[in-house]
Image (cartoon, coloured by chain):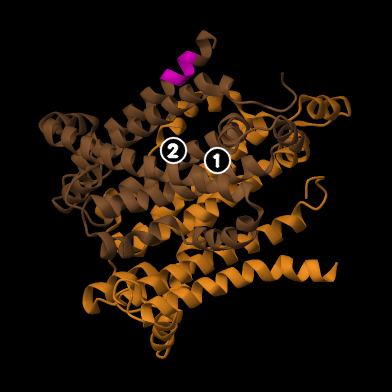
Chain colours: A brown, B orange
């Protein structure tokens, strides 16, 4: 990146902050809705402890939901991709369920699992499950049949077939599913907390909003952006790190 | 041959029908409490009951309107900004970091602020949907223009294309497949943000949208069948919208090899 581009990028962010400051300082936008950057920073400072514990709660929910959704998504996706009968019987049912928007499950999830962590786990896991499952399925379905036949000719066991052939070959696709799943998991995390919750980032925003503490609302919103950015970057790093594990047809 | 075709279609249909029968069966036999999992028959009768006074139709209409309005608005902004960024490098350099950051904030995280700014009601819902459907279209449009095959550009230049033609005939057309995939992703997002926005932004009055309907009937009468009805309707609406989009796009993009 040349200096000119860096300068342009920095100036864009500075201009944004400048406009924000001017809009609030001269009360062009009602400061009740858009408090200045200094108010937002102050509210982070004031509520540091509550914010930190909310971060912990939300992240915990995201991680459990993500783990559940990923494990079941990879397992069922590979199974459906590998077993032809399941492809014709189970897949249509999964397709039907997938067409329900993830977040439309929130109310019934609350009926089933209550307002606490379990309904959040469920909705986040669903939001992660479908993209992971779909991509794992496609990954297995699109494996070069030559590889599978070769493996069978060597008399490979089912377990080895899974571990040495199916998983590595579908790795690239599964990772695409993980990345999409993480994104929709983060959305589900916030959505479940905003709709009904007693703790977490979404809950803090919801509370702050009903007390007209817009500084805190914006502070939490902006920190969700930071969280999302780092989680996504972490995923990209992981993918690069483990990419060598995957096999692509045509490579030796 | 024919027989194979029939099993090809019948097997998936059978499994879905079987699922519905089992679902109805276990609930009718009270193996599962019908409160927790209302059977298909109660979902159907809830639909009949709610549409007897036209309430359900109004809910569907207003929700569809919001979803499509927000989607249209978000996609338009996305395409315009994406094209502008792809065409003017300096502009792209200035706003790229801002865009990279703001698209990380999920649309549902804007709900509390949207309520503060727009108050409870349709405007806040519309804002959330617009914000959500904006990003996939913007990013895909920008990428589409950015990665236009330089060969096309050089060919157009040597044939004497001016800036306007270059933009319209080369950049825009070459980016269309990517714009399409952005539009495709966004239509799903429009419906997912619709339901959360309507659930969270409790508007008043009968016929205020599907999310409102689910919220109202559950909170007032503990009707879980209406919750399932809402899910079914949202699934159908999303499905129809995606089908409509793909039919429209196939017509528009007939000349592309991959369609």
Q: Residue at x 68, y 32 (%)?
A: A155
Q: Residue at x 45, y 26 (%)?
A: B97
Measuring from the top left, give residue B68's x and y in whole percent. 52, 62
Contact between marks 1 and 2 (CB within 8 A): the answer is yes
Report, in whole angstroms, how far the alpha carbon at label 1 lies from the one at label 2. 10 Å
Residue that badge 1 annotates: B138
Q: Is residue B201 above or below residue A197?
A: below
Give the crowd class for mark 2: few <14, some 14-19, many >=20 residues within 10 Å: some
Give the crowd class for mark 1: few <14, some 14-19, many >=20 residues within 10 Å: many
- The numbered mark 1 sits on a residue in which chain? B
Measuring from the top left, give residue A131's x and y in whole percent. 51, 46
- The numbered mark 2 sits on a residue in which chain? B
Of the image marks 1 and 2, the number of the one nearer the N terminus:
2
Residue B209 visible? The answer is no
Stretch in magenta:
A6-10
For residue B143, side relative to residue A145 (left or right): left
Measuring from the top left, give residue A28's x and y in whole percent. 27, 42
* Image quadrant where one finds the N terminus of chain B: bottom right
- Specify whether residue B64 is painted magenta: no
Farthest right residue in view: B159
Residue that badge 2 annotates: B103
Badge 2 element: loop
Q: In the rendered image, which quarter is residue A107 located in?
A: bottom left
The one of A21 and A195 positioned closer to us in this rendering: A195
């Amino acid at each position: 990146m040349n200096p000119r581009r860096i300068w342009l990028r920095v100036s864009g962010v500075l201009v944004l902050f400048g406009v924000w400051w001017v809009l609030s300082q001269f009360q062009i936008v009602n400061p009740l809705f858009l408090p200045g950057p200094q108010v937002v920073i102050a509210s982070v400072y004031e509520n540091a402890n509550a914010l930190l514990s909310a971060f912990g709660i939300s992240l915990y929910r995201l991680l459990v939901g993500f783990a559940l959704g990923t494990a079941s998504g990879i397992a069922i996706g590979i199974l459906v991709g590998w077993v032809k009968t399941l492809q014709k019987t189970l897949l249509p049912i999964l397709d039907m369920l997938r067409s329900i928007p993830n977040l439309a499950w929130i109310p019934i999830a609350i009926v089933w699992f209550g307002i606490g962590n379990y309904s959040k786990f469920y909705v986040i896991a669903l939001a992660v499950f479908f993209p992971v499952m779909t991509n794992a399925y496609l990954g297995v379905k699109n494996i070069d049949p030559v590889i599978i036949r070769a493996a069978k000719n060597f008399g490979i066991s089912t377990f080895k077939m899974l571990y040495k052939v199916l998983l590595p070959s579908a790795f690239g696709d599964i990772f695409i599913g993980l990345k999409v799943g993480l994104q929709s998991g983060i959305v589900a995390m916030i959505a479940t907390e905003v709709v009904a919750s007693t703790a977490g980032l979404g809950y803090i925003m919801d509370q702050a909003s009903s007390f007209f503490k817009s500084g805190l609302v914006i502070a939490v919103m902006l920190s969700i952006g930071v969280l999302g950015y780092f989680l996504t970057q972490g995923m990209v790093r992981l993918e690069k790190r483990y990419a060598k594990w995957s096999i692509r047809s045509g490579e030796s | 041959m024919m027989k194979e075709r029939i099993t090809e279609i019948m097997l998936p249909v059978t499994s879905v029908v079987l699922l519905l029968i089992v679902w109805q069966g276990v609930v009718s036999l009270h193996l599962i409490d019908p409160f927790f999992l209302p059977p298909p028959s109660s979902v159907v009768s809830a639909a009949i009951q709610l549409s007897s006074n036209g309430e359900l139709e109004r809910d569907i209409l207003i929700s569809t309107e919001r979803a499509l309005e927000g989607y249209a608005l978000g996609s338009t902004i996305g395409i315009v900004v994406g094209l502008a960024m792809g065409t003017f490098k300096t502009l792209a350099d200035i706003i790229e970091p801002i865009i990279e950051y703001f698209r990380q904030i999920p649309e549902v995280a804007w709900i509390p602020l949207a309520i503060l700014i727009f108050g409870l009601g349709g405007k806040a819902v519309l804002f959330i949907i617009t914000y959500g459907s904006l990003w996939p279209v913007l990013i895909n449009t920008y990428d589409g223009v950015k990665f236009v095959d330089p060969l096309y550009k050089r060919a157009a230049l040597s044939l004497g294309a001016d800036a306007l033609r270059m933009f319209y005939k080369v950049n825009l057309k070459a980016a269309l497949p990517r714009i399409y995939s952005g539009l495709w992703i966004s239509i799903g997002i429009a419906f997912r943000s619709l339901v959360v926005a309507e659930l969270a932004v409790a508007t008043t009055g009968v016929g205020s949208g599907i999310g409102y309907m689910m919220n109202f009937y559950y909170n007032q009468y503990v009707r879980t069948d209406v919750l399932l009805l809402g899910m079914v309707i949202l699934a159908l609406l999303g499905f129809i919208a995606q089908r409509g989009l793909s039919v429209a796009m196939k017509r528009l993009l007939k000349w592309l090899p991959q369609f």
